[in-house]
Image (cartoon, helix red, strand yellow):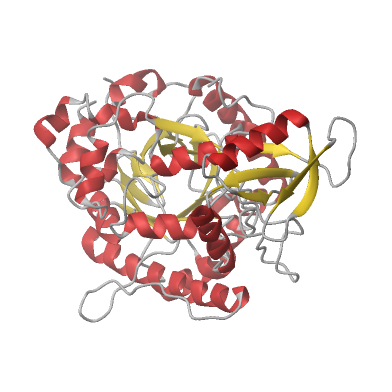
């Protein structure tokens, strides 16, 4: 492998190795600080981060507000307090070494308020902000106001062009790098556009070169690209190093840092990662954000898959082939479906999926009574963790809703991510992971269940493996 030279990121000379941010307490101050102390850029999450009391115990994020808006305000307070706490832990753990970034999602609830609240409360404790999941037009302005660098996460040159033209050209001196996140390989939410086929991955190198050409056009030829998604062995990326078409390059690791001693995920989760096989991570569109996302196939994902498959279209009146009256719900309301779909619906009900629930797309899905009750409860308990949510129909607008019916085909992302990050069941919750997570099982570094420290992992990565 070619020599891996230090680069200047966020005003710090570091290895071009970045810990990818993972929200809801998965990338925390301890893991980020350890990564920075090892000479790279550590990233803690500002997305509903944990804070602790004087005894060092995690403060449960319990909501008491009677309305969604009340609970939304509680969520903002929890998020700001948690982000400040994790920034302090990261700063102390890093010991002045490496660099520290905070990761946020533009489409998370009240992102701008949470981001500015953490920046105000943790001044000087970290050096940059990474931000994706949407089009964060105001990121540059906010970063410049607080004197920190910003790192937009994009998945195409086209997306970056739109951000630069609209806003970033005014704050170019605070742009630390551009994170190219491969939409087919990265874990969590992915930036697959409507023009791209989720089932036909495109190689990342041509897309990164296209991004570099776009950046050069804007005078950003010395601004690094950070490659994210699918990065495992650096020797596999040798043709990216010293490549004039790529330019300055760094690499982000999101999945591998999960399996370290400093990683806050449960021991059961770590052991599960060691057993994954190729194909065990599913690219899906069940998320209430509407984005594609990658998660480990488990009972939770399987239930969502089956829930979406038990689905038939309906009309409110008899129209065309929709001639068969079909009753649903406690009040026995009538809609019209095709004769074939009426038979399918009756068959599902006979199997125990007795409750038919309407979707915003004029379809019915069929679930058990327990599932229906849980879906309704989760929708009612919404605390506005997203800027808009198709599952609950919450939106942080004056009206407080999206203008569409709540969609029972999705799920409460706040609930499931909080549960799994605090030792909840691995099969009953959402387990985000990158496409390459199956490589834990075949990588000799992890033989006999070995779990390294962050320092040991960084040293291993520097060898090319």
- Can you name the residue that lies furthest to the left here? 448
Q: Quadrant of the C terminus?
A: top left
Residue located at (24% from left, 74% from top) = 57
The spot of residue 399 in percent (x, y) is 75, 70
Q: Quadrant of residue 361?
A: top right
- Along the viewing direction, whichever of 463 and 362 lies nearer the viewer: 362
Residue located at (58% from left, 56% from top) = 139
Q: Is residue 375 above or below residue 249?
A: below
- Along the viewing direction, whichever of 434 and 114 lies nearer the viewer: 434
Q: Is residue 83 above or below residue 161?
A: below
- Can you name the residue that lies furthest to the front here? 350
The spot of residue 458 in percent (x, y) is 22, 39
Residue located at (35% from left, 43% from top) = 18
- Along the viewing direction, whichever of 233 and 338 lies nearer the viewer: 338
Residue located at (26% from left, 49% from top) = 35
The spot of residue 146 in percent (x, y) is 51, 67
Q: Quadrant of the N terminus?
A: top left
Q: Is residue 213 above or below residue 377?
A: above
Residue 102 in sight = no
| Left or right: residue 290 compared with residue 10 | right
């Amino acid at each position: 492998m070619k020599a891996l030279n230090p680069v200047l990121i966020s005003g710090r000379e570091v290895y071009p190795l970045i810990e990818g941010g993972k929200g809801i307490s998965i990338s925390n101050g301890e893991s980020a600080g350890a990564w920075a102390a090892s000479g790279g850029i550590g990233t803690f999450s500002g997305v509903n981060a944990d804070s602790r009391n004087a005894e060092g115990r995690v403060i449960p994020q319990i909501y008491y507000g009677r309305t969604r808006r009340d609970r939304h305000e509680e969520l903002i307070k929890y998020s700001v307090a948690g982000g400040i706490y994790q920034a302090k832990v990261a700063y102390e753990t890093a010991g002045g070494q490496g660099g520290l970034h905070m990761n946020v999602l533009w489409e998370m609830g009240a992102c701008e308020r949470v981001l500015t609240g953490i920046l105000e409360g943790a001044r000087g404790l970290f050096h940059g902000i990474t931000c994706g999941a949407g089009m964060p037009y105001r990121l540059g302005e906010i970063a410049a106001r607080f004197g920190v660098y910003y790192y937009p996460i994009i998945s195409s040159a086209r997306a970056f062009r739109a951000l630069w033209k609209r806003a970033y050209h005014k704050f170019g001196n605070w742009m630390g790098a551009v994170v190219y996140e491969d939409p087919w390989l990265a874990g969590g939410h992915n930036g697959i556009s409507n023009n791209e086929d989720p089932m036909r991955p495109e190689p990342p190198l041509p897309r990164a070169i296209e991004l570099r050409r776009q950046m050069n056009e804007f005078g950003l030829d010395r601004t690094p690209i950070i490659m994210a998604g699918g990065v495992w062995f650096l020797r596999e990326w040798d043709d990216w190093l010293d490549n004039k078409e790529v330019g300055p390059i760094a690499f982000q690791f999101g999945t591998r840092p999960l399996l370290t001693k400093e990683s806050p995920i449960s021991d059961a989760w770590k052991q599960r990662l060691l057993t994954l096989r190729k194909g065990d991570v599913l690219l899906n569109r069940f998320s209430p954000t509407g984005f594609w996302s990658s998660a480990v196939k488990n009972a939770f994902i399987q239930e969502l898959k089956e829930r979406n498959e038990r689905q038939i279209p309906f009309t409110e009146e008899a129209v065309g082939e929709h001639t068969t009256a079909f009753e649903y719900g406690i009040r026995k309301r009538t809609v019209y479906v095709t004769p074939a779909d009426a038979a399918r619906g009756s068959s599902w009900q006979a199997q125990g999926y007795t409750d038919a629930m309407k979707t915003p797309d004029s379809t019915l899905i069929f679930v058990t009574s327990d599932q229906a009750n849980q879906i309704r409860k989760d929708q009612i308990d919404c605390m506005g963790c997203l800027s808009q949510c198709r599952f609950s129909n919450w939106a942080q607008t004056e009206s407080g809703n999206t203008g569409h019916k709540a969609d029972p085909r999705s799920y409460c992302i706040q609930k499931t991510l909080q549960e799994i990050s605090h030792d909840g069941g691995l099969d009953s919750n959402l387990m985000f992971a990158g496409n390459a997570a199956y490589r834990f099982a075949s990588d000799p570094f992890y033989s006999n269940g070995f779990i390294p420290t962050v320092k040991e992992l960084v040293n291993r990565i520097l060898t090319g493996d």
